[in-house]
Image: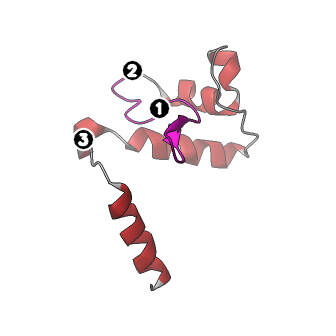
Amino acid sequence: HIAGRGGRIQGPDLSNVVAKGRTKDWLTKFIKDPQAISPWSIMPKYDLKEQDLNNLSDFILALDFDRHGMKILSQKDIDAKNSSKRGD
């Protein structure tokens, strides 16, 4: 994904992994140890509890654009949403 100012790549694009043919098993293994699946991955390993790893995999797999459509948020939209949560 891309994060921070300047759009620096912080890790792989995990959106819409369903369309990329990825399974829950593949995704779970990739999150736990990305370099074991893809040696050139810049994503760090995540030492999560098994239940947390499964929950995260389920969440990422639910980001299926074919079923839910893609939504693009601008920085202005994100700032406004965060501001309303803080009560600004």
Amino acid at circle 3: Arg
Q: Looking at the picture, how far across and down is residue 28, in whole percent?
A: 60, 32
- The residue most toward the right is 47
Q: Which residues are magenta?
A: 1-21
Amino acid at circle 2: Gly
Q: Looking at the picture, how far across and down is residue 77, in whole percent?
A: 33, 63
| Label 1 SS | loop
Contact flag, marks 3 and 1 (Cβ < 8 Å): no
Contact flag, marks 2 and 1 (Cβ < 8 Å): no
- The residue most toward the bottom is 87
Amino acid at circle 1: Asp
Q: Going by the image, does 66 lie left or right of 13?
A: left
Mark positioned earlier in the residue sequence (3 or 1): 1
Against 40, is 14 above or below?
below
Q: Read off the residue under disc 2.
A: 21
| Label 3 SS | helix
Mark 3 vs mark 1: in front = 1
| Label 2 SS | loop
Query: Which residue sits at x=70%, y=43%?
Result: 50
- Dividing the image into 4 quarters, which one contains the C terminus? bottom left
Query: Which residue sits at x=43%, y=38%?
Result: 61
Estimate the spatial distance between the alpha carbons at disc 2 and disc 3, rounded to whole Å: 15 Å
Estimate the spatial distance between the alpha carbons at disc 3 and disc 1, rounded to whole Å: 18 Å
> Which label sits on residue 67?
3
Q: Looking at the picture, how far across and down is residue 47, in whole percent?
A: 76, 40
Q: Read off the residue under disc 1.
A: 13
Q: Looking at the picture, how far across and down is residue 45, in whole percent?
A: 72, 33
